[in-house]
Amino acid sequence: MRKKWQNVGDDQPGRGRQAEFTLPVDIIEGRQGFRLLCMLPGVEPDQVSVEMDGNILTISGERRLPALEDGERLESIESRHGFFRRQFKVPERADTSAIAARYEDGILEVSIPRKDSGPARSIPVTAAGN
């Protein structure tokens, strides 16, 4: 049975800051590897951080309220804003040394290729005591 991605945290204990909303993430597995699609409309790429520590992938950042012009005030807020943080335990079959992140049209795509298992090889069988 394949191990699924394990969510290991949505906040940041010890740094005095907790997530204000949960970042929606879709995870896709294919023959070449994994793609994480993070829905971040209205967030600039420089407001997002992607870090790999051991086998823990952390995606964090901040969605800010829209800038108000002189004389404007927020009448209603239905979108999520504030600090976000998601952490995932990455499966062992992922090559964490080759992670790439790309941001386009409000979606952060984190790509992680599969580890190359190498070519098949024959294992000689020897008799006990030889």
Image: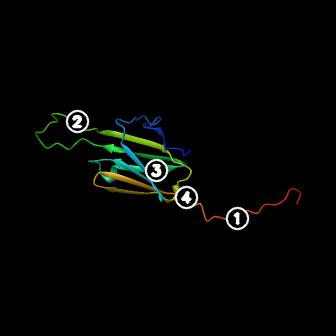
Identify whether 110 is placed above or below 76: below
Q: Amino acid at mark 4?
A: Lys
Screen quadrant of the N terminus? top right
Q: Residue at x 51, y 48 (%)?
A: 90
Spatial CA distance of label 3 from label 1 is: 38 Å
Identify the secondary structure beneath mark 4. Answer: loop
35, 78: nearer the viewer:
35
User: Residue 21: percent from the left, percent from the top?
Assistant: 34, 36
27, 48: nearer the viewer:
27
Say how many tags the image has: 4
Screen quadrant of the C terminus? bottom right
Which disc number belongs to residue 122?
A: 1
Spatial CA distance of label 4 from label 1 is: 20 Å
Q: Earlier in the sequence, mark 2 or mark 3?
A: 3
Which disc number belongs to residue 78?
A: 2
Q: Is the residue under label 4 in contact with that under label 3 (CB below 8 Å)? A: no
Q: Give the label, 4 or 2, closer to the camera.
A: 4
Residue topped by disc 4: 115
Q: Is the residue under label 3 in contact with that under label 2 (CB below 8 Å)? A: no
Q: Residue at x 31, y 39 (%)?
A: 82
Q: Earlier in the sequence, mark 3 or mark 4?
A: 3
Spatial CA distance of label 4 from label 2 is: 42 Å
Spatial CA distance of label 2 from label 3 is: 29 Å
Q: Amino acid at mark 2?
A: Glu
Q: Amino acid at mark 1?
A: Ser
Identify the secondary structure beneath mark 3. Answer: strand
Q: Earlier in the sequence, mark 4 or mark 1?
A: 4
Residue topped by disc 3: 51
Q: Amino acid at mark 3?
A: Glu
Identify whether 26 is placed above or below 16: below
10 Å neighbourhood of mark 1: few (<14), some, or many (≥20)? Answer: few
Q: Report the side of 92 relative to 71 (left or right).
A: right
